[in-house]
Every structure is written in structure tokens, then in C-alpha cells.
Amino acid sequence: MKKHNFYAGPSILPEYTIKNTAEAVLNFAGTGLSVMEVSHRGKEFVAVMDEARALFKEILDIPQGYEVLFLGGGASTQFCMVPYNLLNKKAAYLNTGAWASKAQKEAHLFGEVVEVASSKDANYNYIPKGFSVPEDADYLHITTNNTIYGTEIKEDLDVNVPLVADMSSDIFSRPVDVSKYALIYGGAQKNLAPAGVAFVVVKTDILGKVDRPIPTMLDYRTHVEKGSMFNTPPVLPVFAALQTLKWLKQQGGVAEMQKRNREKAALLYDEIDRNKLFKATVTNHEDRSLMNICFVMNEEYADLEKEFLDFATQRGMVGIKGHRSVGGFRASTYNALPIESVKALVEVMQEFERKH
Ligand code: PMP
């Protein structure tokens, strides 16, 4: 039976990425060796790193003055690297979920933190708007897509201070005006690569402005100067990321991804809104994530939750159980998920409705 992969992360990757990576695990670039057993300083891998950086810039249309880094430690290490490198006195954070709040927690180690707004009171089921940002903040940190709660900031905000964004779960899902950001980061394990590498897009002129000493490994300047090769980079995930970047380019880039993601999300949200058994947890349409679509049973059908999960699982749906802090279901519809998988889920929801 065909499996439809709705996992939130690690999650579905393009078949192109998986096949090319599998081949390189056996024989990398004609070396007769596995990509897992070659020197990261050999010319074959240096070429991979260079091409990955260049394609990342090309696909996201990154202007001059920015560098792309591939680092270990996941997005969670960026929660501390951002304030370590950028927070002099005060930083502003928008609290839109558990990850946003974890990022904010780290900043307290380095200075004053102003929470400009929070949707915690409503279990993070909306994106706060109309907040003001202190003019003397060193930066505003946002999480563009809230993987757990299924909300998303789908436009690039205009703010009066440098903007820092965690784009772990929506990178490459839409065009981004990178010039509006001082720094963008994320873990790669959703739209880009297997777990093990984080990406950072940094405007280099914002670095070097804090007074504190920074440990070498946690200083962005180290990695800018050494082209992400200061220490051994996550070789296999970077190789896989390059394959996804090539796939993205072949498919028509981020504008095409946005078009497909909008179609997939519309199909599923429409069914959730129509089907008498289900309801979406995010009611503001503009805040609904195109990447993580969260829904629960309607109150009068609450006792059918387990039955629906089993019913859907038996029909090939994988990874649709919601995060424990929201409950219900979450279907993640990342770039690599084909619309056929969304159609299959919609059919399962309709079949289940007919049964009840
Ligand atoms: N930010 C967001 C929005 C996430 O979804 C996640 C992980 N799912 C993280 C940060 C943490 O990423 P990592 O596990 O790579 O540290």
C-alpha cells in the first residue's frame, strides 16, 4: 500500500534527494567511496558545499551582503547563537509558540528581553498583530511557521529594527524578501535535508557589534570566514540539501512551491471546514499555516478520535497524529508532499464521514 508521509519533521523529502543521496552513499562523485567516508576537505565535497551555498542564494534570491552557512547543532543552537552574536542590551521577541518561546528563553542569558506580543493565552492558535517593537531593541525575533500549532506569518514584516526569523518549517515554501531580514535560520529536517544540519542566512554587516567575547564555534564570523568548514560540517545532510536545492530549481523554484503549497492547503482546509466531523484549530484564515495543518474532531464526535487515527493509518496515512499540546491531528504538507497525498487524506476523511 502507498504510504502518505505527513510527518512534521523529520519529514518527507523529494524522491530525487533520497535516490541521489542513496547513490552517493555507495559511490560518491565517481570516487568509488561513500560520501560518508571521504574527507570534507577533498575537492569533491568542497564542490558540494560551494554549490549548495550558491544554489541556496540563487533560489532564495539572496542579495549581496549576506552569507549562507551550514552548521551542526540544529535550530536549537541558533536560539543561543542569535543573542550571543546580536544582543547588546535588549532584544524583542514575538511569542507565537513553543519554539518561539524556547528561543526567547535563551536570550534572557544575554540581556533584556521584551516580549512584544504573545498568543499563549489561546494555546497559540493565532498570530498576534499590531504590536509595537521598542526602537532601541537590537533585533526582533519571529518564528515564521509554528510547526506545533499550525500558524504561519506568510508575509515579510516591515519593522523598525533588524529582523531575525526562525524559518525551520517554512523555508523554501514561498518567495522571501531576504533584504527585510538581518538573519534567517532553521533546522533543515523539514523542507531541505535529513536532520543534522542547520542553515543560517546572515547579513554580514550586523556581526561584530556586541561587546562580549564569543566562543569561536558560536561566533558567526568564524563560519563566514571559513565557509562553513571551520570544523567538520555535517557532510551527508549537506550533500542531501544540495540535491533538494537542485530539485527545487528544476521544479520552478519557490514561486512554484508557493503555488503548490497554496493548492494543497486549500484542498485540506476546505475539507476540514466542510466535513461535519472535524474542525480546524486555527480559525483565522490568514494565520493558517500552509505547512502544518492542525485539526481536531468536532465536540460531538470527540470520542471518534482514536478510531479516525486507526482508520486513516490503515489506509496509508502516516504521521497525522497531532502534537500532544494540541491533540487531534496534524497533516504536514511540506514542499515534497505531492497533492495526491492530500487528495488521499481528503478521501479518507470523507469515507469516515459517510461511516458516521
Ligand atoms: N524551530 C521550529 C519552528 C521547529 O519546528 C523546530 C523543530 N521541529 C525547531 C525550531 C528545533 O529544531 P532542532 O530540532 O533542529 O533544534
Image: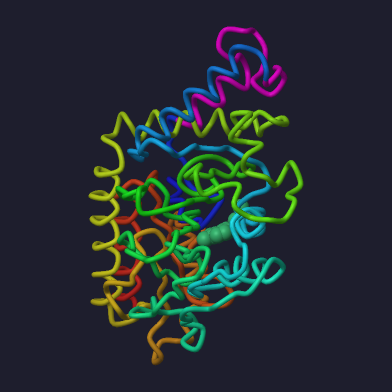
Label count reads 0
Q: Indicate yes or no whether the magenta region holds residue 27.
A: yes
Identify the residue shown where x is 59% and y is 56%: 86
Q: Is residue 222 visible?
A: yes
Residue 191's spot in the image, x, y percent? 45, 46
Q: Can residue 340 be seen in this view?
A: no
Side (left or right) of 122 relative to 231: left
Residue 225's spot in the image, x, y percent? 61, 31
Identify the residue shown where x is 31% and y is 76%: 353
Q: Which one is nearer the viewer's eye here, 281 or 4?
A: 281
Residue range of the region highlighted in magenta in the rendering? 17-40
Identify the residue shown where x is 72% and y is 19%: 37
Ligand 1 falls in quadrant:
bottom right
Q: Relative to residue 24, is residue 105 depicted above or below?
A: below
* Quarter of image, res 128: bottom left
Q: Which one is nearer the viewer's eye here, 46 or 151?
A: 46
**Farthest residue in the bottom direction?**
300
The quadrant of the picture occupied by the C terminus is bottom left
Identify the residue shown where x is 58% and y is 70%: 90
Q: Relative to residue 327, is residue 257 depicted above or below?
A: above
